Image (tube, coloured by chain):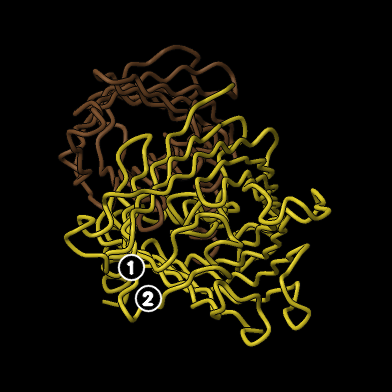
Chain colours: A brown, B yellow
Amino acid sequence: MMFVLLSVAFQAEAQKLITRTATASFYSKAKLEDISAENKQVTMLINTATQAVAVKVPIRSFEFEKALMEEHFNENYLESEKYSEATFSGKISESTPVDWKKDGTYEVNVEGKLTLHGVAKSITEKATITIKGETISVTCKFRVKLADYGIKNDKLENIAEEIDIRINGELKPL
Amino acid sequence: MRTGVLFLALAMGLIASAQEEEDDLLSSLDSISPPSKEIAFATFKGTRLINGHTIQIPAQGEMAFLISHRFGNIRDGAYTFFGLDQASVRLGLEYSPIDRLCVGIGRSVYQKSVDGFLKYQLLQQSKGGKLTMPVSVTLLSGIAVNGLKWAEPNRENYFTSRLTYTHQILIARKMNADLSFQLMPTLIHYNLVAKVAESNDVYALGIGGRYKLTRRLSVNAEVYPVLNHTEMPAINGLKPATCVAVGVDIETGGHVFQLHVTNAQAMIEKGFISESTGSFFEGNLYFGFNVSRTFNLH
């Protein structure tokens, strides 16, 4: 019995796909200036046995064109000293199954909890999964309304009310 | 019976583990990617706390233009519109050509001075890396040239007599997102003093801090007690007063506005630290502001 449980646990471990160098980028279009930033230190994990997905984005690692933008982003908007990371935990919807053993491109729905600026919300977004041998690429584009996550926007700096976010990662078996 | 209990326990365990799994997956991400080194940012909003420097410098490749004003003495009353009739100005440029190093120049109405300085960020407060650094340390070395006409033009005057040097070790700690403190051990060296009994060197230990009230507003305070007060050079026959200043920082995009009251009218170290004539607490107050605008020179 013990042996069976152990082997199950072992098997589950082997079904994890991971990357530490996924990217998250966002784009804000506004009157005063367009602002974009990229973060190359995103970790992403998919458990192919349970279809579970987890993503962690360290807020401080976003890189901007101007140092002052980065300071304002961390200090005034995302308050990264209080909320150091954004996370997503959820799963690939059963309505859009993926055959992890077969090469191809799958359009899937991902549903789960997005935690940003200390506020957690349930979201469902479309993602594209491309399987080519051992490498699995994941791309997800979605839009976040700042007000939903308690990110204060004031009229001084003209930040867009909704931000386009793109997550991109190449996962390999752990 | 025993098998039934075992089965039930197993089933419950499975349900529980399914619920916990998403969180487990997230926490396993933590172990895979431990938090990386984080350098404390924006310990202070500007390169000046009020009169004096902070540990901050412009980011590499950026230039800041500073316009600083101190009005007249508030004690002069309604006749001078509480000092607003007259103003002393310093115009300054600060530029960081390479990472951690800043060069600055300025011109003040005060003694028609030209000043220049170098500022180097020796240590940066950080956490999460191999080494935790509890404080940020910035070194400052400056020189000020008194541009006034010689008081006694008939005697032999040397250019070096116009020079005063300032050396500071700025030590700051950002306690949390809102609260920052700074210590400013300072040495001011006068090439020329009026009397033999006066020391060419003035030692001061500045203390300052800021507290953020909102995302864009902070209150600041700063005091520069002189340690060798009895031997410091006199101004108009009187020993100078300790420089005290309180103010607010207001941030709007690329600008930082600093509004304050202080008992100093000069905006260079030797002026406000060792040449402020009236006591803050006796109401010798000057209203003033600093405005800084950052430009990107990439």
The residue pinned by badge 1 equals B285
Q: Nearer the viewer, residue A83 or A10?
A: A83
Q: Are the residues tagged 1 and 2 within 8 Å (C-beta)? A: yes
Residue visible at 49% across and 47% down in the picture:
A12
Amino acid found under the numbered disc labelled 2: Phe
Q: Above or below — where is B203 with respect to B42?
A: below
The residue pinned by badge 2 equals B280
Horizontal and vertical percent position of residue A52:
37, 41
Q: Nearer the viewer, residue B40 or B82?
A: B82
Horizontal and vertical percent position of residue B298:
59, 21
Q: Chain of mark 1?
A: B
Amino acid found under the numbered disc labelled 1: Leu
Instruction: Residue lying at the far bottom in this picture: please name it.
Output: B230
Instruction: Return the disc, 1 or 2, that comes first in the chain's sequence.
Output: 2
Residue visible at 73% across and 65% down in the picture:
B190
Let me know if marks 1 and 2 both belong to one chain.
yes
Q: Nearer the viewer, residue A7 or A167?
A: A167
